[in-house]
Image (cartoon, rainbow, N blue to C red):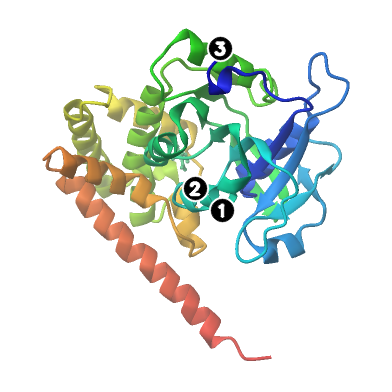
Amino acid sequence: MTLTDKPIPQPLHWHVLGAGAMGCLWACAMAMQARDGASGRAQVSLLLRHQAALLSYPGHIKSSAMAQPVVMPAHTTGGNVVDLPGQIDNLFVATKAQDTLPALTGVAKYLTTDCRIVLLQNGLKVQREVSQQFGAERVFCLSTSHGAWLRAPFDVVHAGNGETWLGQLTPASDDSAARQQALLAVLPAQQLNIRIDDDIAARLWRKLAINCAINALTVIHDCRNGELLRIPAARQTLTRLCHEISALLQAIPAAPAIDDLFTQVQQVLMVTTDNISSTLQDVRRARDTEIDHLNGYLCELAAQHGLACPVNKAVLQQMRVLESRAKQAAQHTINQRPLT
Ligand code: KPL
């Protein structure tokens, strides 16, 4: 019996790390799922990285998908204060890509040796790093098209119903199939429309390619997704980006070939025409973006394989300028506020 073939300990207890929109959505869905053959519901605890977040936590999460607020305990894991009672058997990580490794390091000593780590991040870089660092057998990756946003802290709106795919970066085997089935059985599979993907890596690569084509460009043109097809300069760069990303994927040995990337990107842009991309939302709120895990990662891989990527590099450079300008402007606004 390998590490994660052991039965998932009952009663089921999920720890959810990261209380953004996705973390809140999943924590509520997990808490409310009625488990087959079990009388109780799954226990869910929220892990917050900052003491200030814990102080503002009202003791429950509201979700537009639930009639009642969902009561659950919260604990801090960051800074000097660590107040986690007990150990972690099942960890769901919904932090941003760049926060994932530090957040995991913060809870590492609480993870049982059999702990399952479920990752819900954009890109592919952090999934590879966590699999390498924590053992690929215990790491599961999700790719989701559900849309969610926070109306207020701990108050999530499930804005777009989508689908979620679950898989592992380990080579396909009977063991990995059994592990994924066992995990699926304890996830809110119906509510969040979760299915197993035998080739989750290919799915994550495709999503990475699509995000690399769209996200930074929406910041450069400060526009909603659909406008990228209507603004001539944006459409032109989009075409060049898709062309370059396809060529890079073709040349990177671990990546799948995607011949029709522009068509796929066009479809995503039409379906999400009124969306403000996650990267533009971050820039507008002067928050760190995930760009290092999107075009930044692609440029890193290109360098590793001696491939040129001038369009991605240019977009990345523009993004860095715009991101730091947004932060400076926010800082300036704070500095201008009268002292009270
Ligand atoms: O995933 C997205 C994002 O905003 O990060 C897209 C597909 C661009 C939809 O908005």
Q: Is residue 295 left or right of residue 189?
A: left
Q: Earlier in the sequence, mark 1 or mark 3?
A: 1
Q: Position of residue 57 (x, y in %)?
A: 76, 58
The kind of secondary structure element at disc 2 is helix
- Few, some or many C-alpha atoms within 10 Å of disc 3 (few <14, some 14-19, many ≥20)? few
- Measured in 3D between alpha carbons, the distance from the residue under mark 3 to the one under mark 2, in whole angstroms, is 26 Å
Q: Is residue 258 above or below residue 210?
A: above
- The residue that label 1 is drawn on is 106
- Measured in 3D between alpha carbons, the distance from the residue under mark 1 to the one under mark 3, in whole angstroms, is 29 Å
Placement of the C terminus among the 4 image quadrants: bottom right
Placement of the N terminus among the 4 image quadrants: top right
In the foreground, 127 or 200? 127
Question: Which label is found at residue 220?
Answer: none
**Amino acid type, mark 3:** Ala
- Few, some or many C-alpha atoms within 10 Å of disc 1 (few <14, some 14-19, many ≥20)? some
Q: Position of residue 48 (x, y in %)?
A: 66, 54
**Amino acid type, mark 1:** Gly
The residue at 38%/63% (across/down) is: 323
Identify the residue at the far top of this view.
Answer: 174
Q: Is residue 261 above or below residue 236?
A: above
The kind of secondary structure element at disc 3 is helix
Answer whether labels 3 and 2 touch (C-beta < 8 Å): no
Q: Is residue 199 above or below residue 242?
A: above
- The residue that label 2 is drawn on is 100
Q: Is residue 209 left or right of residue 26?
A: left
The residue at 42%/68% (across/down) is: 326
**Amino acid type, mark 2:** Thr
- The residue that label 3 is drawn on is 178
